[in-house]
Image (spheres, rainbow, N blue to C red):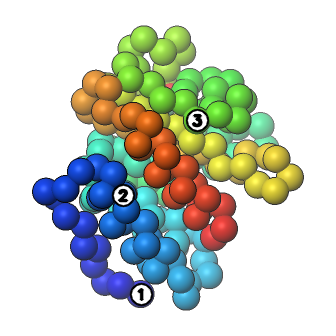
Amino acid sequence: MAEQLVVHNDVSKEQRYQELLPQLEALVAGESDFIANLSNILAALKTTFNWLWVGVYLVKENELVLGPFQGPIACTRIGYGRGVCGTSWEQKEVLLVPDVDAFPGHIACSSASRSEIVLPVINTSGEVTLVLDIDSDKLNDFDETDKKYLMKIVELINKL
Ligand code: SME
């Protein structure tokens, strides 16, 4: 396992994702524990992009329960169809929220959060097993480039 990530700061966001992805694959190769690998992927995302909050909510029975994350403490349980995370779970869709204040029902775990992207992880039976949630303290911080590459990271998480 690599001990540190090498991702350049002075390149485009797309290039940073392209540098990061193979390193994430290497990071999880050789370790079979789901939580260990997931935690390292989240830490790598947080340190690379310096977002406010990077974490997951795991589907447990009828709600989402906080899993591994990096950032400020967060709400622990989110209902089906509630907030951005519960809506992503319900719709089985990636939700890109440029302004969290404009999203009806947004759950403010941190008052510093301004924009958010949530991606569902869907297993081979078509069920959502967890959602990847990323918050930024900047408005409109996520775009189609983030969606494209975070979907690849979701694929990686799905194979852990
Ligand atoms: N904002 C999310 C809640 C989770 S926190 O952002 C960590 C939502 O509306 O579902």
Q: Within 8 Å: ligand 1 and the Cβ of disc 3?
A: no
Question: Image quadrant of residue 72?
Answer: top left
Q: Is residue 86 left or right of residue 37?
A: right
Q: Is residue 55 above or below residue 28?
A: above
Q: Which amino acid does label 3 sit on?
A: Val
From the viewer's perspective, tell me whether residue 67 is left or right of residue 145.
Answer: right
Label 1 vs 3, first from the N-terminus? 1
Task: Work out whether residue 123 or residue 143 is closer to the camera in this orientation and state it.
Answer: 143
Residue in the picture at 65% in, 34% down = 93
Q: Name the residue under label 3.
A: 94
User: Which residue in the protein does label 1 denote?
Assistant: 1
Disc 1 to disc 3, C-alpha distance = 30 Å
Q: How crowded is mark 2: few (under 14 residues within 10 Å), some or many (20 or more)?
A: many
Looking at marks 3 and 2 on the same chain, the residue that comes earlier in the sequence is marked by 2
Helix, strand or loop at mark 3:
loop
Task: Residue 50 in the image: state x and y as whole percent.
Answer: 25, 50
Label 1 sits on a secondary structure element that is loop
Residue position marked by numbered label 2 in the rendering:
17
Label 1 amino acid? Met
| Element assignment for label 2 | helix
